[in-house]
Image: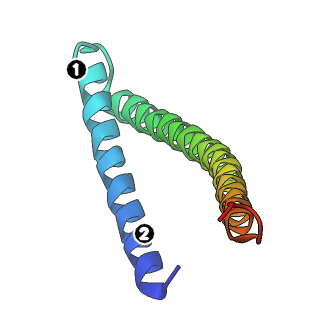
Amino acid sequence: MSITDRSLNDIEGHLLLAATRAEGRTAADRFCEPLHWLTRAQREEVERRFEAEYLTLARASWQRTADRAGELREEYRTAYRALRRRLVMAWLLTCALGTGVLALCLAPGTFPG
């Protein structure tokens, strides 16, 4: 991975994190909206904790997604190797049969004449 790719990945990660934090703040605000009995300090504490939990859950979800992507990558790699091995074997068998047929056809005495 090039430096540019890593930089773009970092920027994308920061943007994703910022968007998730904003979503968490919005969700915390919606959660606290009906809780009119909370004092301002209590509301801010609940919102802060809600946002932190939201971010923790998002990170756990991202990690599960990344883990599954790694598992799928390995499964596809294994399947691709097996397919490639079968194709190479089929090609070699076809070449061997073609060579055998050609040798048989060109062998002296194969055809009367």
> Where in the figure is residue 7, as x and y percent of width and height?
42, 79
Instruction: Residue at 42% x, 34% y: name it.
Output: 45
Residue 113 lies left or right of residue 29; in this view the side is right
Which numbered disc covers residue 9? Answer: 2
Residue 34 lies left or right of residue 54; in this view the side is left
**Mark 2 or 1 closer to N-term?**
2
Marks 2/1: CA–CA distance? 36 Å
Instruction: Residue at 37% x, 74% y: name it.
Output: 8
Residue 93 lies left or right of residue 14; in this view the side is right
Question: Callout 2: helix, strand or loop?
Answer: helix
Quarter of the image where the C terminus is located: bottom right
> Where in the figure is residue 52, as x and y percent of width and height?
48, 40
> Where in the figure is residue 75, as x and y percent of width and height?
66, 43
Question: Callout 1: helix, strand or loop?
Answer: loop
Neighbours of disc 2 within 10 Å: few (<14), some (14-19), many (20+) = few
Query: What's under tag 2, amino acid-wise?
Result: Asn
User: Picture quarter containing residue 63?
Assistant: top right
Q: Which residue is mark 1?
A: 33
Q: Nearer the viewer, residue 78 or 45?
A: 78
Q: Is residue 8 above or below residue 19?
A: below
Residue 69 lies left or right of residue 33; in this view the side is right
Residue furthest to the front in view is 113
Q: What is the basis of the colouring in this image?
A: rainbow
Q: Nearer the viewer, residue 13 or 48?
A: 13
